[in-house]
Amino acid sequence: MKKLIRKAGGLPALFLALCLTLGGCAPIFQTKEPEKVEAVPKNVDSQGEPFGTVYEADIFSFDRPVSPAAQVLPSPSGVYVMDPFGQDETLREFDAEGRCLRELGDTRPEWVGPEGTAWRLEYTEDRNDRHTDYAVYRAGEAEPVLRFTTEQGTAELTVGDGFLLITRQWWDESNAGHYSLSAYDLAGQLLNEQPLNQWFQLYRDGGELYFFGRESYEIFRLDGQDFSLDKVDSLKEDENLNGISGGQLFSNDGTCVYRRAVGGAEREALFRYDALYLTPGLAPVPMGDSGCFLFHEITNEVSPYKIARPVDENAAPAQRQTVVLACNDPEAASFNRPYPSSFWEAIADFNTASRDYEVVVKNYADSPDPQTALNADMAAGETPDLIDLAGFSAGLATAANAEDLLPYVERDCDKDALLAGPLKAMETDGKLFSLMPSFTVQALLAPAALVNGQDTGSWAALSALAGGAEHVFYQSVSRGDFLRAVFAGGQRDYTAEQTADILAFAAALPEQALQNPYDLPQEELEQMAEEGTFFELDHRPILAGEQSFELAQVSGPVIPQSNGEDYTAVGLGYEEGVFGQKLTALPLPGRSGFALCPAQELMMPLKAGNKDGAWAFIQFALQDRYLTDMSYGMGFRRGIPLTRSAYEQGARAWEKLNGVISGSADGVDYSLTYDPANCEALFRRLLDGAESVQRGPDELYTAVEGLARSFFAGDKTLEEAAADIASRLQVYTAEHS
């Protein structure tokens, strides 16, 4: 039997490549306009000189899908966009408003003449004889205008004003580089040929062509009559060339963007990256003669495109108020991100687009004890305005610490825009102490035929159905994982009898989940466990009939969640395919409904100093673009989205699967079948049946776990430990009622 391993990272190959639609970014809520404050003082450049132009930045959207992997280059009227992961390979030109001006077919920007005629360069490589045959075609013509061969190296085509340029580069036996330039007329007749002393990058400005030396940083203008290269400028050591437009040269030094006339001595500082909350070092693309610059930040798949626009100084953005967001993100330094926190894309975009607020992140992961450090700040009056609860104690989100967000929601929200069941489950005694833009649902998954008409109201009953507690999960869930699922949040008013049932079941589970999909020796397993190496979940026990249930966090109706950070969430269709029969979902015994597990969660402290700004960011983070992952057809981004529009948009991405999930994981091909109607109905049941929130361990869980260990160690009987835990839970319930 083939080995099936949950490998969420391999699943994008299952789907059609859907492009990220960067549509309007208006929030689903509306807030009152905050009071404006005085305008910011003029910025200064790297040398302390004031700027002569005022710019503002914003999120940029095209009028049709453009993926984060697209290539963006300057064009006469805006930018050229080539999108290898888009709907087709058509070169398009867009203006500074994101409107498509024209489609140029299967070509490249340097193959489009100043008058708009498109060309293409095709080649066939002969590896045996080490030569390459090239052919140049005019768009719409079947016969090539020009053919040529290179014995080694590469060749590039650039279309000029009434001529074709071929640049070649190759290396000799001493690994020394050689370069040449050939000019042909539009009929393919050779006009000129000359050696070059280095590899040049070509820039077009209307009918003019400029050559930028990659070694000398010198800039030459091509004479279209005799094809000589006339030096007209050069870059300083701290400059990077961004483009040439309208006779103006645009450059940056990693801190500021500059403009000067080609050949001119004085450069004008346009703006600083940090003043516009743009990632330093990005090379902005001048957009024709609009005066705007497009920024392409490929690390941000949500909103990879930003724009900087010149504005009247009197219309410049006001001085922004600070919103302090606390997080505990120990892996922030491992990723190429401008901000820590799981909300980093929304923070980057908010700081770019907001005219009123700036989010400043304080990462408590830098402290030896992040929770203690946060508590100390809050006690000392240095309370943050927002808390990303991931990594902090679940006990923070209580009436003693958190602002009730329900009045904000009721004031500004169209209730129909949110999923009513999950929103209600987030409430505690009619108050909303945190808000989860995305989440999973905790459930027990099992074959419907196994549990139909059977008693599933206790862990003992599940043990009987599976032939013993040791077969319910068959070592796929550790004792600690099980106790956290039962006691860490959610329902906690268990009786002594229910607690005894839980402890007896836990005693049959292993101390460590013994998943071993690669059949490694036990010593290697233990060493990897000490190093924290993560194993994909092994489904072989289910296939062999040794495991009847799975304790799951469901993230979607069909496929597992894949966000590069957390592979623990599952999809119902995928699981049904693994079980090989229709599934049903059960709440944990002792509970009447399902629990939400936060994939992202924000809390506004009671003593936050800028609650209007904090709420403005929460609204911003609820936009569909941060909740769906349509760039690769994955549906939801980090879990089930709270907004109805994101839910419906993400779910549509999975309708194409038609009951079959196939692909490859770790070199193993698989094809899983599921019942779409059953999975859709099951998924809706999970959402409608949510009644509580399952967070990470808190102080109560720590106390309960200690009491449970006394039973596992034999220091207390089952009855004694169960009574002690039930008593502790009863005290907690009374204190929080």
Image (cartoon, helix red, strand yellow):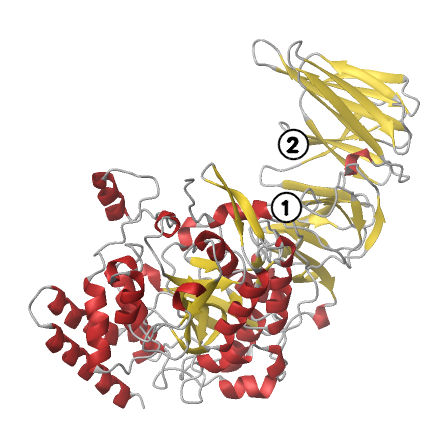
Residue 684 is situated, as x and y percent measured from the top left of the image, at 54, 72
Residue 493 is situated, as x and y percent measured from the top left of the image, at 28, 83
Which disc is residue 217 wearing? 2
User: Is 231 positioned to the left or the right of 161 in the image?
Assistant: left
Three-letter residue code for mark 2? Tyr
Looking at this rendering, what residue extends furthest in the right direction?
187
Please say whether residue 511 is visible from this viewpoint. Answer: yes
Is disc 2 placed on a helix, strand or loop?
Answer: loop
Residue 401 is situated, as x and y percent measured from the top left of the image, at 36, 82
Quick one: 270 or 641, which is closer to the camera? 641
Three-letter residue code for mark 1? Ala
Residue for badge 1: 69
Say if 35 sits above or below 524 in the image. Answer: below
User: Is 454 positioned to the left or the right of 276 in the image?
Assistant: left
Where's the C terminus, which quadrant? bottom left
Q: CA distance from mark 2 to mark 1?
A: 28 Å
Residue 310 is situated, as x and y percent measured from the top left of the image, at 73, 61
